[in-house]
Image (cartoon, helix red, strand yellow):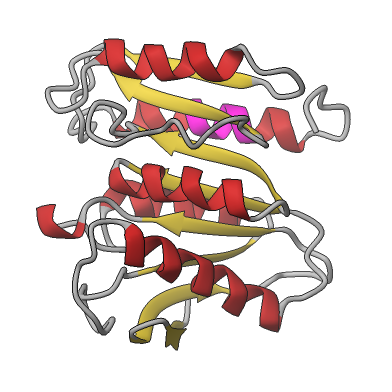
Amino acid sequence: MPDVIFPGPEGRIEGRFSPPPRPRAPVALILHPHPQGGGTMNDRITQAMYKSFVARGFAVLRFNFRGVGRSQGVFDNGIGELSDAASALDWVQSIHPEAQTTWVAGFSFGAWIGMQLLMRRPEIRGFLSVAPPANMYDFSFLAPCPSSGIIVAGLQDEIVPPASIQKLVDKLRTQRGITIHHDEIPRANHFFEHELDQLMKSLDNYLDMRLAPDSPIR
């Protein structure tokens, strides 16, 4: 899990990178929650998703958005952070250009950034979106959503009402050619304080299904 520094739109970006374990290994980019709410790449959900992809043989990068940790710049309300994510993906692809597929995973604010990124990068074939802030940000850009993925949220989420996430899921499910999974963790709040194991079981089961040779979803 080497520390890395790579160029971003506002200067250096700090990250942690697990190199590809084999030629043509897939890539995963992991995005952390809101910088102004204390979110960093060392958030426990961000780290857990990172480790899950590493265990499945991906080249995996998590990083700090601008103004967080040793990353230069200042918070930019999502606009600059999306540029940071694009630069991060560019960096991984520059050192691992033979990757066959790419995934993006994000928690809360990071889920919003990740779903914007997949609209701009056709190489992204799957996503994990944990507690996307569907009540705070406009997700209408997902028209149409280009990739299948999973959205997981807690039914006791005090920040993002489950109804707003259900509305987002229902909208995405009207689109043809993709499959949206939706799991709800009954006792989980926005931060999955006591339900991290249940969250990761949901995400791991989904990844195992999607990555199986006979998966019906491609």
Residue found at the far right of this picture: 214
Q: Is residue 81 above or below residue 12?
A: above
Query: Can residue 184 be seen in this snapshot?
Result: no
Viewer-closest of 74 and 38: 74
Magenta stretch: includes residue 83 = no
Q: Is residue 12 above or below residue 107?
A: below
Of the 4 image quadrants, the one containing the C terminus is top right
Q: Residue at x 61, y 12 (%)?
A: 174
Viewer-closest of 164 and 102: 164
Picture coordinates of residue 170, whole percent (x, y): 49, 11
Start-end of magenta stretch: 202-207
Count numbered badges in the picture: 0
Q: Is residue 165 left or right of residue 36?
A: right
Picture coordinates of residue 80, whole percent (x, y): 34, 67
- Which quadrant of the figure has residue 212? top right
Q: Is residue 156 left or right of residue 176?
A: left
Q: Is residue 100 above or below residue 140?
A: below
Query: Can residue 203 be seen in this snapshot?
Result: yes
Q: Residue at x 22, y 33 (%)?
A: 136
Q: Is residue 8 left or right of residue 25?
A: left
Q: Is residue 149 left or right of residue 48?
A: right
Picture coordinates of residue 116, whole percent (x, y): 48, 47
Magenta stretch: includes residue 205 = yes
